Amino acid sequence: MKKKDFLVVPIIITVILIIWILFLKKEKEQIKDYPQIEKSGTLHIVTDYNSIGYFVSGDTIAGFNHDLIQLIETYIPIKIEVSLESSLEKSIEDLKKGKYDVLARNIPVTTLLRDSLKFTEAIVQNRQVLIQRKKSFNDNIEPIRSHLDLAKKTIYISAKSPAKLRLQNLSHEIGDTIYIKEDQVYGSEQLAILVASKEIDYAVCDEKTAENIAKGLPEIDYATFIGFTHLEAWAVREQSPILLDSLNTWIQRLKKTDAYKKIYSKYYK
């Protein structure tokens, strides 16, 4: 074997080892569960910025999910780090990659999402509504009240939103096409703002959020229901069963406290 070959072989072996180490590190991140999270000392939570779950009020941060996260922090021995992400699709992707440990936004529990996420115990009940403009802000056109009138309409939802499945089923129910546009950037609240500003005509949002943002957006109408009452919960990776059990234990404990009842009443009643 030539001297040159003696030099090449160790280099190739070194490169292979580096790639293998990086692969193992990535795999470890993906299957991170509560023992590894506890050892790291930080639980990484991602939520979205909206007028119900997480927002700035004066010089303080408030919101149902924000307050609930703070309450949970009193039950656990590790620090919580919260990140904000409007896109549900991006949040789910980063959760699966191991960047975050918990997806703390109110997600409708559907069979579609259950294929890729593990949901906690239900936190609240909600239902989806059609966001459109009121007659006085829409060239005197009456808001849609019958699902049959959704035929051939284009409705915007955030990417990976559970509303997609409901709209697809609704399309079958009315026997006509409903065009669904998945926005890769905006959440449902931002899409409602686009409806108010006449950039789009229809979007889907949960009722509680719609009720809240309508206080500052008199243009929007949210009286037409898209779906039935559903359960909403937080989510973790499929590979984090111990974390899921821990979260469920904490949530069950919280629901029995006056502090939780006060938070729920503040944002949902």
Image (tube, rainbow, N blue to C red):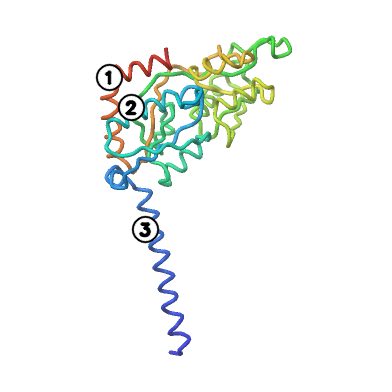
C-alpha distance separating marks 3 and 1: 42 Å
Task: Specify the amino acid type for callout 2.
Answer: Leu
- Pick out the residue farthest to the front: 59
Considering the numbered disc 3 on the image, is that residue within a helix, a strand or a loop?
Answer: helix
C-alpha distance separating marks 3 and 2: 35 Å
Q: Nearer the viewer, residue 169 or 216?
A: 216
Q: Earlier in the sequence, mark 3 or mark 1?
A: 3
Residue 58 lies, in percent from the top left, at 51, 23
Quadrant in the picture for residue 259: top left
Quadrant in the picture for residue 96: top left
Task: Specify the amino acid type for callout 1.
Answer: Thr
User: Could you say which disc has been placed on residue 71 in the image?
Assistant: 2
Residue count near mark 2 (Cα–Cα under 10 Å), binned few <14, some 14–19, many ≥20: some
Residue count near mark 3 (Cα–Cα under 10 Å), binned few <14, some 14–19, many ≥20: few
List the residue tagged with mark 3.
24
Q: Looking at the picture, does residue 81 appear above or below residue 70?
A: below
Q: Looking at the picture, does residue 194 appear above or below residue 184?
A: above
Task: Specify the amino acid type for callout 3.
Answer: Leu
Residue 198 lies, in percent from the top left, at 69, 22
Q: Earlier in the sequence, mark 3 or mark 2?
A: 3
User: Could you say which disc has been placed on residue 257 in the image?
Assistant: 1
